[in-house]
């Protein structure tokens, strides 16, 4: 039992960066923009968040900076694709390359300008982000350990995802966003400011991706900067958007599943050891677990397209620029 | 509501205009990154001098340049074929890898027994088939069920990548390398030849440029690609089999990427073996290159040349100036952002309307009518 709890606990943690990235990308895609720059925005958020935390020792400020950086990066994307009508795929990929370069470049600068060459967050800062037990709730056997003894950023990710879910599903603004994503011409005709809505959602999405980056650099790195910290997690997030069928609420569950795949790579042998009937887990190569999120997503993508359901599909106008004169 | 700014489409710009815009955009990107270098207390002019010379300093550095140039060129050419048809093949990375995987299998299996030239030809074909098969899956699903090709090709990249990880960890692992999980080096016969120390894949790449140029411009298939890209309905009404064109084009596109993978894998640059880093992002950069070059084979050659010089040069400058080689990524990103931004002003015209009061103008209209 303990192994399972430990495993699920780690899976939740591993899924958090995906959850941020996915929530951000869902917001972006729901407004009709396919931003493939998640990886880049996460990288930029990771660096700026870390640097702010490193210099100011203030967790809140670090998160704000990471959010802001992601939003600025997304603003560049929005400006190029919404206002200047540039191709979304290409712009997103450029953002990914740029973001990775940005983070590595300044990361190495930071390493060079740190006296001992090891930029490390202060003890106090790390402590602020360490796991803590919520009183009473964490005393519940199993569940307490599993759900109520995480660091604050884990809870924040779930809150953000839920808020985004409510925003998209139940608010007026969410409805506007979705209508722009499905049919911008109709939204425009009904009097919505398509450009503004796209900008705001792309930037909000980018900011949330930036938070995901901050999680990676502040928490996963153990307080030490690492140039390659995001390492494909942005791409897994893009995959998770499809797996979660464009719903932030489903993304919470999905991030747990993808987190489990990540953790299985490390813990398959533990499982095999503890439960003999799961012995086969230890024999599956790690590459398989790494491939799993993408393979499943590809499968989901194919199956949904075969079943031709409108529900849980990519927004109809996603990836297509809206040019008013061609309406 | 009165719109003060009005945006309308311009007629197609001339080639010279486009080239001029590009030069300005590149200079802007270089200038911005120069500022960055200046802020970091280095001399930007010296820096870019080193970057530009980085590829042509010595035989060795030119060799390193070619190793960056050839795979990027081939992958960009491959991507451009699908993009011409407005089929968003983001999967060049995976197709590149699959080409390498298939070719590697042939090389390892028959490398000891077959003649060098037979082997080269078969590996080339295997590479093309490997890439092509990975590319035709999303094309088929797109035609049959309308599956989103952007997302599916993206996913297939990683499936291919981790397939290599699996192969190098498991079935293809070289047992002689204790502790390392690497695939065995290809036998001598399965390696790409060298001329003057530089492997000949660049010749193939340049041939490919010419072939594609002719294919796009003078062949029936090339024409079909552009018709399908412009409007599938037009293509259908004129009697083309759109699905066939889509699948064939996508196969060609990804087969070219696969050939790129084969050539890189069997070359000295990757020490004649298949590794997880075989593509290393080349498939993504290729998309940017192809787009910047407006999908023209000659343009792609030029842009790839510039990108490769930049990448090699920043590597050289890293040691000299103690600045991370990722400047190359930043400059590449900037160039693209700026050119994409500029392109808007090439394609669209912005006119500023004078704010006119509504009733006044209607009076004017009324007067005109009277007259």
Image (cartoon, rainbow, N blue to C red):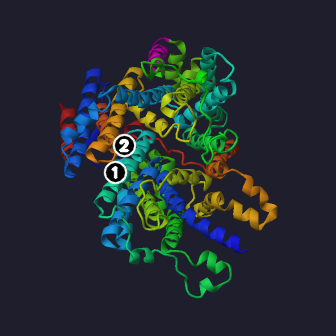
Q: Chain of mark 1?
A: A
Quadrant in the picture for the C terminus of chain A: top left
**Farthest bottom residue in view:** A136
User: Which SS class for mark 1?
Assistant: helix
Residues B232 and A183: in front is: B232
The magenta stretch is B204-218
Quadrant in the picture for the N terminus of chain A: bottom right
User: Which SS class for mark 2?
Assistant: helix
Residue that appears at 51% across and 74% down? A151
**Farthest top residue in view:** B218
Q: Chain of mark 2?
A: B
- How dense is the environment of label 1, judged by Cα within 10 Å: few (below 14), some, or many (20 and up)? many
Residue that appears at 43% across and 58% down? A226
x%, y% of residue A11? 61, 65
Residue that appears at 49% across and 57% down? A21
Marker disc for residue B329: 2
Is residue A318 found inside the magenta-colored segment of the image? no
Q: Is residue A244 above or below residue B210?
A: below
Q: Is residue A220 above or below residue B299?
A: below
Residues B55 and A308: in front is: B55
Q: Quadrant of residue B139?
A: top right
Report the Cα–Cα distance between label 2 and label 1: 9 Å
Disc 2 + disc 1, Cβ < 8 Å: yes
Give the residue at mark 1. A105
Q: Is residue B315 above or below residue A54?
A: above
């Amino acid at each position: 039992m303990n192994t399972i709890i430990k495993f699920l606990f780690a899976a939740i943690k591993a899924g958090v960066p995906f959850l941020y990235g996915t929530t951000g990308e869902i917001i972006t895609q729901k407004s009709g923009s396919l931003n493939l720059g998640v990886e880049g925005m996460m990288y930029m958020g990771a660096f700026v968040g870390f640097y702010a935390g490193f210099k100011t020792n203030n967790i809140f400020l670090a998160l704000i900076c990471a959010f802001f950086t992601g939003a600025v990066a997304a603003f560049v994307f929005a400006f190029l694709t919404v206002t200047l009508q540039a191709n979304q795929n290409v712009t997103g990929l450029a953002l990914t390359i740029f973001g990775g370069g940005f983070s590595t470049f300044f990361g190495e600068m930071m390493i060079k300008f740190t006296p001992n060459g090891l930029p490390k967050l202060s003890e106090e800062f790390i402590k602020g982000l360490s796991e803590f037990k919520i009183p009473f709730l964490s005393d519940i056997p199993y569940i307490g350990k599993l759900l109520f003894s995480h660091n604050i950023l884990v809870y924040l990710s779930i809150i953000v995802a839920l808020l985004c879910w409510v925003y998209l599903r139940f608010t007026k603004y969410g409805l506007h966003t979705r209508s722009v994503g499905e049919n911008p011409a109709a939204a425009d005709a009904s009097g919505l400011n398509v450009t503004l809505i796209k900008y705001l959602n792309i930037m909000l999405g980018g900011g949330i991706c930036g938070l995901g980056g901050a999680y990676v650099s502040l928490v996963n790195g153990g307080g030490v900067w690492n140039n390659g910290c995001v390492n494909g997690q942005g791409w897994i997030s893009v995959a998770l958007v499809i797996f979660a069928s464009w719903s932030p609420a489903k993304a919470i569950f999905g991030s747990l599943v993808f987190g489990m795949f990540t953790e299985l790579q490390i813990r398959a042998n533990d499982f095999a050891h503890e439960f003999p009937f799961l012995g086969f887990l230890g024999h599956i190569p790690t590459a398989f677990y790494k491939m799993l999120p993408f393979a499943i997503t590809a499968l989901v993508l194919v199956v949904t397209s075969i079943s031709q359901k409108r529900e849980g599909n990519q927004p109809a106008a996603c990836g297509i620029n809206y040019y008013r004169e061609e309406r | 509501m009165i719109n003060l700014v009005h945006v309308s489409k311009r007629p197609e710009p001339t080639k010279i205009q486009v080239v001029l815009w590009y030069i300005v955009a590149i200079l802007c990107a270089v200038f911005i990154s120069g500022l960055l270098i200046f802020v970091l207390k280095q001399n930007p002019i010296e820096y870019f001098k080193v970057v530009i010379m980085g590829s042509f300093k010595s035989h060795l550095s030119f060799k390193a340049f070619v190793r960056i140039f050839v795979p990027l060129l081939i992958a960009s050419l491959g991507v451009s074929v699908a993009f011409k048809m407005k089929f968003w093949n983001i999967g060049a990375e995976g197709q590149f890898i699959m080409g390498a995987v298939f070719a590697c299998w042939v090389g390892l299996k028959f490398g000891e027994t077959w003649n060098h030239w037979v082997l080269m030809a078969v590996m080339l074909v295997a590479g093309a088939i490997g890439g092509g098969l990975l590319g035709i899956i999303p094309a088929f699903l797109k035609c049959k069920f309308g599956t989103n090709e952007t997302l599916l090709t993206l996913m297939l990249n990683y499936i291919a990548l981790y397939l290599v990880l699996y192969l190098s960890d498991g079935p293809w692992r070289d047992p002689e390398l204790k502790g390392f999980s690497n695939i065995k080096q290809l036998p001598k016969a399965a390696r790409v030849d060298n001329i003057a120390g530089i492997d000949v894949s660049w010749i193939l790449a340049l041939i490919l440029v010419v072939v594609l140029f002719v294919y796009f411009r003078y062949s029936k298939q090339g024409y079909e690609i552009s018709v399908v890209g412009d409007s599938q309905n037009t293509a259908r009404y004129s009697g083309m089999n759109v699905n066939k064109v889509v699948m064939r084009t996508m196969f060609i596109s990804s087969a070219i990427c696969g050939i790129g993978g084969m050539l890189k894998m069997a070359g000295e640059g990757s020490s004649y073996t298949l590794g997880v880093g075989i593509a290393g992002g080349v498939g993504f950069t290729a998309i940017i290159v192809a787009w910047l070059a407006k999908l023209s084979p000659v343009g792609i050659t030029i842009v790839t040349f510039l990108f490769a010089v930049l990448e090699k040069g920043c590597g050289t400058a890293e040691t000299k100036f103690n600045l991370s080689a990722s400047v190359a990524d930043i400059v590449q990103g900037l160039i693209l952002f700026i050119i994409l931004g500029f392109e808007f002003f090439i394609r669209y015209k912005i006119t500023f309307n004078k704010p006119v009061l509504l009733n006044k103008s209607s009076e004017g209209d009324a007067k005109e009518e009277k007259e």
